[in-house]
Amino acid sequence: MDLGTEAAVRAARDAGVSTMITIGCDADTSRAAIAVAAQHPEVWATVGLHPHEAQHGTDQLLPFIDQPRVIAIGECGLDYYYEHSDRPSQRRAFAEQIALAHQHELTLVVHTRDAWDETLDILDAEGVPTNTVMHCFSGGPEHAKLCLDRGMFLSFSGIVTFKNAADLRDAALMCPEDRLLVETDSPYLAPVPHRGKQNQPAFVAVVGNAIAKLRNVAPEHLAEATSRNARRAFPRMAA
């Protein structure tokens, strides 16, 4: 059952989540993200073309980029697992959105699946924006180092709680505290013990608590650190 925007924001607020970012994946969802952010002072929006939608072109994003409460370009990148868009279209759309992040001085939110080498190659060719977030990071320590060496933030989702995610937990353990973010990727990837349910922003504390336990720090300490990092990763949000 769809929780609905109003209920999700209210539940997150009740759970102590003070700030949320809702993601654009094409023109329609970017428009909707901006509308939600306009209605809720604790919500910010991104504008992006997901690799699944890359074949439709990035021009559709241009009317939304300078809208109030837009703080990032993305999510964008490469997805060679599903390949709903052909690879040349994905590569072109990703490069164009990196350029938009540079041009508008916005954070870049990156999605990659089964495409690590080409994702990093394109970032290197276009120049990694000052604030770049590897969204829903799913690699191990080696991929984490490649991202960290390029100055990125690593954002961990509920996958870190999954039984078969040992490499990901190793990456969360080795990530420097000042580059660590937590997210939900709602409505997907609900963390244990909520597997099988619709994910929601209120569950972000479950992810944070799991990583705090892994790193042997207090949950409050991790919450403060990741909140501070989010303001650094998305400076428009802190302005």
Image (spheres, grey):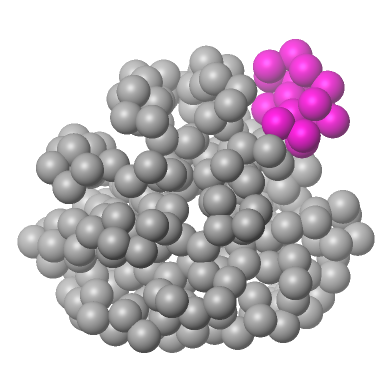
Q: Residue furthest front?
A: 239
In the depicted view, which residue is nearer to us: 190 or 49?
A: 49
Q: Quadrant of the N terminus?
A: bottom right
User: On the image, which quarter does residue 228 sit in?
Assistant: top right
Q: Residue furthest left?
A: 88
Q: Quadrant of the C terminus?
A: bottom right
Q: Position of residue 134 (x, y in %)?
A: 42, 42
Q: Position of residue 10 (x, y in %)?
A: 85, 70
Q: Position of residue 68 (x, y in %)?
A: 56, 77
In the depicted view, which residue is nearer to us: 237 or 21?
A: 237
> Residue at horizontal 54%, vertical 51%?
234
| 229 to the left or right of 50 | right
User: On the image, which quarter does residue 84 sit in?
Assistant: bottom left
Part of the protein shown in magenta: 209-225
Majority SS type along the magenta span: helix
| 112 to the left or right of 59 | right
Q: Residue furthest right?
A: 14
Is 173 inside the magenta-drawn segment?
no
Question: Exactly how many numbered labels are in the figure?
Answer: 0
Relative to 234, residue 9 above or below: below
